[in-house]
Image (cartoon, rainbow, N blue to C red):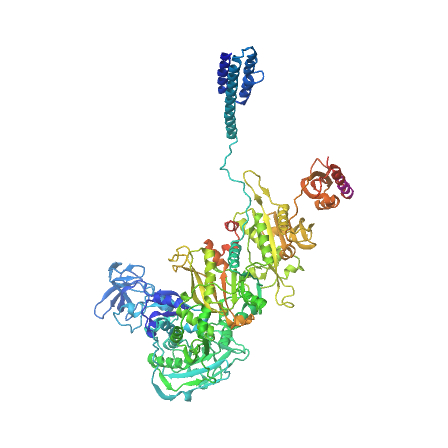
Amino acid sequence: MKEQLGKIKLEAKKALDHAKNMEELNDLKVKYLGKKGELTQVLRGMGQLSAEERPIIGQLANEVRDELNATLEEQMNLIKKTEQKQKLNLETIDTTLPGKSFSRGTKHPLTQVIEEAKQIFMGLGFQIAEGPEIETDYYNFEALNLPKDHPARDMQDTFYITPEVVLRTHTSPVQVRSMEKLNPEVPVKIICPGKVYRKDDDATHSPMFHQIEGLVIDKGIRMSDLKGVLLVFAQQMFGADRKIRFRPSYFPFTEPSAEVDVSCGICDGDGCKSCSYTGWLEILGSGMVHPNVLKYGGYDPTEVTGFAFGMGVERIAMLKYGITDMRLLFENDIRFLQQF
Amino acid sequence: MKVSFKWLQEYVDIDITPEELADRLTNAGVTVEYIEHLNKGVAGVVVGEVLEVVKHPNAEKLSLCQVTTDGDNHFQVVCGAPNVRTGQKIPFALVGAELPGGLKIKQAKLRGTESQGMICSAQELGINEEGLTSDQKEGILDLDPTAPLGMDIIEYLSLDDCVLEFDLTPNRSDCLSVMNIAREVAALLGKEVKLPEIKFSDIEKKIEDLAEVEIKDSNLCRRYVAKIVEGVQIKPSPQWLKHKLICAGMRPINNVVDITNYVLMEMGQPLHAFDYNYLSAGKIIVRKAEKGEKITTLDENERELTEDMLLITDSQKAVGIAGVMGGLNSEVTHDTTTVLIESAYFNPSNIRRTSTSLGLRSEASLRFEKGINIETVVDAANRTAQLLAELADGKVLKGIIDNYPNPIERTKIKLELTKVNEVLGTNINDEQIKEILSSLNINIIEENGSVITLEIPPYRPDITIAEDLIEEVARLAGYDNIPTTLPFGASSKGQKTLEQKLRDKIIDTITARGLTEVISFSFINKTNFDKLLISEGDIRRQAIPVLNPLSEEQGYMRTTLFPGLLDILRRNINRRSENLGIFELGKIYLPQGFPEKSILPQEKWTLGIALRGELVSNWQDKAQPVDFYYLKGIVEDMLEQLKITDILFKPCQDSPLYHPGRSAYVYVSGEMLGIIGEVHPQVADNYDLAARNYAAELDVELLIKLGHGPIKFKQLPRYPAVHRDLALVVKEEVTASQLMEVIWAEGGDLLSDVTIFDLYKGNQIALDYKSLAFALTFQAENRTLTDIEINDIHEKIQKALAEKFQASLRS
């Protein structure tokens, strides 16, 4: 009987080792370990054994069964793995084919720049103001210390709707409109993005373009505050390593006035073609609000001071994205717009 | 304003390079835009004289010239210029000389003849031709006979000079004068200005005996000064004077005209020289023009004047438009011997109005309209007389007429010294402040503790208030010295208004659906209304015109976003982008009674969408052309995102812009939001667009009014939902919304959702019929629904549909 068990073990192990798939393994399981399997058959003959032999053979039979079960399981795992591998192989796809495309919409680059500016200034506590594009001469010029016949009116070629109504030439009329709404409240802290119009059309000018106006009024506002706020803006808009520079300038509605440059990002201020070898790029005009403008807005210039600035959004977008021709921004070529 | 650097050096000692000076000035707000060095590479060229000109033996068009540069030595030179002649002084490039562009003069043989050098044209010397006469431009440069033989041409033509070109802000019109720029330079460099000494000898004859000046409007003419010089010889100006004028961009004419221009540039005082012999009775009257009065100005144009324009007349006729341009009838000509010099101060606004309405801008009007220095009016007249005596052999009459009825006092401003640092955020001490102001000739006339009273020099009319003085201090101290701080007052909340947030949300939802935002011009051509088939009475035709548009293309403010959107489709198709989905969120401009009834027109935020072509395509899915439902889906999605629920689409058959069978009015909460649909094929054709195009134009303000519903969480259902399908066959003309309405009405509270999942037309059902399949979802909040309940409702729905629309179940 002992020999019989040994023979079964050898035979079964060999068969299991050679099994090629699950089916064969299952057949072998039935053949050797099943209810009518060979091992069971042998165990049934145990009754004929002597009392001394029985436990010895019993143990041996158990050992053989355990061993065969272990081998079976091992083989099953092996074959499962192989079979799965084969299956996965068959399922291989070309992962280099393009992914499913969804038509992608983009916001106009000017909208994106305006939004970014809004976020920066909101972070500094500014509110977003708005005003009409078709504006009275009063708000566009007079209340900004630009009476009729003022030579500085030449600085802006104006579209007229009637002799007293214009297409606003800048977003500055929102300064006095906001002051009228808010006075005597302080602080006034607003920016106003929007469309403006000037009678000009060439590679660097468009008859319609966008500006962002800024205005702060409070007790004790200083020109150094203007510098600080614009530095925060420039560094967030263009990069933390950028510097700004103030140059004296003239606007009838600010005094003192300053033109503001940002250091050129291409040459880091060393001078290159983009910045006409100056190392600086002009980005906006600014200054301390002229006392007359404060008065027009209902504030007392001996009580409060303020600063204001105005920037061209197209200019900012061109600098930020490296756009060389302003007209691209209004041609609305889909291949251009979808780059942003 | 352009100024010779050397000229500037005559008035102030400049010990830095032109480039360094330009930087200093620019940083102080007097911007130098460009520096032009006049020597473009000339070396070894001297003043020569042509001694003999004969025809070249072998060439028809060439001459053989003998040139000397010292009177002794002769050079034989072949010259091709037609204007070469004996006795002429010319720029002569010796062998070894260099010319701009790297040309080196060598000994050469031209058509078999030796040529030892070259006679140069202005162009060959790289000289700006602006200041040259046409003769001088044609051939070789004809020099003045007085040019010293052998002198280096660099010295003679001042080619070692450079020109500073200023870009002045309107407030700094004082710098339209070399003298005042010198004052600015002196302040910046800590130097003294050296002004030219005005002195001349006069003759016995008195001006009072010859002339008289009467100012009839002392408001428009604050001061009028006259000076007479007789025995004047009209001739060309000396080279040094010509050079300065040419640098300033003025063409030399003759000594008298050039001298007035010279003093204008030097002192900033416009002058006019009349030929005294053409002034009837030696009388000057300054008065307003009569209506329709005419005058022919120096440029030989007859001008009709209006009553608010100021005229200079003699006892009989107009002889000049004050401050703008002189009259042709009294101009200085070759025969002039006696000149009356006018030096005056005219009202800036009046000059500006006159020159604007006549479209006549001159160097004079440019200065008058910005306000000149009223105190130099006499000096300028005397300076002119001096130069006429020196350069035109003039005899200056004794005395001067100075008609100055109401002398103007100098501006005085009180400045609180502490205010300077308060406004700037700087830390400049009082002494520095005073020093800076004094360097600008702004002098303290009274001091009272920290409050000082300052007197402003008359050439700085831009300084009128304390803030102007603060700016002067800041720019001289350097803007770079202003520190960087942040405002420290009360904090404020940074935020957008609800309206702004909702507009942003609209853009977000639409871009998320794959459309690209465009921005088009607010103005349109009126022809668009015809192209859009908009009928005569339509409100959109009442677009607001621009009084002075750049072109007809931009003549009117848009009343619809359609033209912009359709043009953008067209432009992109031209560039081979055929599949397009675009939108614009912008304003339209409606008169609403403007200008009669309202101060300003209405500006209405509007959303425009345009689609065409196939919007999704890849290697897996076949491209689907966009259609009405694609557009509608975008609009519905946007409404859903804005939490707008009461929406109704109603067929629209009467809008000229849209296909009558494929467009719909959109109503929200009973108000008309706009129209969506296929662009009318005729309209599309008018914009050169092939079919099919889809568009929508919606009222953003209505969206904002309704779209602010708060988001409120709803409990998730705890009991299972029951789904039932309902496939109906109905007549073709029955609309989906009609069926839906009945389903919802009959479905009651337990019906929670209805969607359409199929539409079928074809041979499985009768002609003129269609099949619509609905998926119904039933759900209760508090229990699991039973089949029996659902069956009841379902049957009720079927019954109602059968009754109302003869709907049958599809078998």
Residue A168 sits inside the magenta stretch: no
Residue B385 quadrant = bottom left
- Magenta span contains residue B799: yes
On screen, B791 above or below B274? above
Magenta extent: B794-803
In the image, B146 versus A319, the foreground residue is: A319
In the drawing, does residue B801 fall left or right of residue A118? right
- Residue lying at the far front in this picture: please name it: A52
| x and y, in percent, of residue B256 in the image | 38, 78
Residue A271, given in percent of the width and then of the height, sits at: 38, 58
Q: Position of residue A11 (x, y in %)?
A: 49, 15
Classify B229 as above or below B808.
below
Task: Tell me the quadrant of the picture where the C terminus of chain B can be found.
Answer: top right
* Residue A161 in sight in this render: no
Q: Dividing the image into 4 quarters, which one contains the N terminus of chain B?
A: bottom left
Dominant secondary structure of the residues highlighted in magenta in the image: helix
Q: Is residue B579 left or right of residue B32?
A: right
Q: Nearer the viewer, residue A273 or B553?
A: A273
Quadrant for residue B535, please give it: bottom right
- Residue ranking furthest to the left: B72
Residue B506 on image: x %, y %? 59, 53
**Could you tell me if residue A177 is visible in this image?**
yes
> Front-most of A91 and A181?
A181
